[in-house]
Image: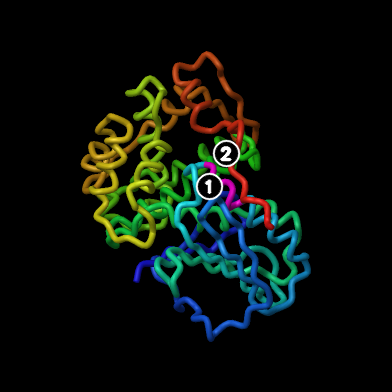
Amino acid sequence: MALRCCFPLLLVLVPVCPALAQDGPPGPSHVEIASTHELRFGTNVLQVDFAAGDLDLHTDTIMAHVQAAASAVATYYGRLPVARARLLLVPVAGRSGIMQGTTWPGMNGYQGFTRIRIGQHTTTSELAEDWTTTHELVHMAFPTLPDDQHWMEEGLATYVEPIARVQTGELEARQVWRDMVYGMRKGEPADGDSGLDRTHTWGRTYWGGALFCLVADVTIRRETQNHKGLQDALRAIVAQGGTIDHEWPLDQALAIGDRATGTHVLTRLYAEWKDKAVPVDLPKLWDDLGIHWTAGGPIEFVASAPLASIREAIASPVPRPLKPDPIR
């Protein structure tokens, strides 16, 4: 069974996830549920269960965080990706912060099932800084791939998560681009590395996959005069049934994405990157996007840069972010 698992560090946007979890998902008889809640986006439902255990934060505060994460994913994809999903929050005594998240396909009647371990003493500021919940829910919006393409699953979630949160106004674009400038270099091939399908290090899996998504997004927008982007490709993949509960070859998903954008960017880029190391001239890319940054200083945007409009199209708030339906 495929799974996608993340153990957050204190650094923003630096996920650390093993390819395999040490334990499996809890069955319905293995966990005592303290309360159950639902977030509905039209006909699609995210069930949120709190396992028994002590938490300093009120349930409403944690639910507001979950709602923000679900809204970011629904906004980016135009809907909650699957019809029925479940999120299980498991308190961990004596600890603080969001400690780990794992997502599985097709568990107990749910198309996607995510378990989040949350420390008993988690604070509101730690909750506000958490990216794990959104990252895990993004995993539901792409088909389960063979092991060699695990980089696409994790890289996609790493790339989409902050952009989705910008679209709903949860994050500022400057913060996201600053983190990308810091993080994307970790995805560059090191000496001795091969293509993304062949080098399965942490950096190449998470940031290499994210770098693939960034280059694809920029390239699609350049080839379509900024009328289409990676978001259009990913929405089309979900619309064609490419969600976590289906096992697809990566070529199938990328071909759907290319048809949606009227390009061959995704399949072409994958053919180039899958079995050989392809470096990216990141300093030039940041300059072209109009992103200027010095170590320890703030991000500055250059409006006159040749790809400044693409930068703005990738990460800007949307007028009407999707929110769950009112509970009746």
Q: Which residues are magenta?
A: 69-75
- Left or right, residue 199 beside residue 221: left
Which residue is at 45% across, 42% downward? Answer: 184
Say which residue label 2 marks.
Answer: 176
Label 2 or label 1, whichever lies nearer to me, is: 1
Residue at the farthest bottom position: 29
| Structural crowding at the residue carrying mark 2, measured as other residues with C-alpha within 10 Å and reported as few (<14), some (14–19) or many (≥20) | many
Residue 169 in percent (x, y) is at 65, 38
Quadrant holding the C terminus:
bottom right
Which residue is at 51% across, 37% downward? Answer: 181
Say which residue label 1 marks.
Answer: 74
Say what secondary structure mark 1 lies in: helix
Residue 139 in percent (x, y) is at 44, 56
Which of the 4 image quarters holds residue 19?
Answer: bottom left
Which residue is at 36% across, 39% downward? Answer: 233
Residues at circles 2 and 1 in contact by the CB criterion of under 8 Å: no
Is residue 73 inside the magenta stretch? yes
Quadrant holding the N terminus:
bottom left
Disc 1 marks which amino acid? Ala
- Left or right, residue 229 beside residue 89: left
Residue 77 in percent (x, y) is at 47, 44
Disc 2 marks which amino acid? Val
- Left or right, residue 143 beside residue 121: left
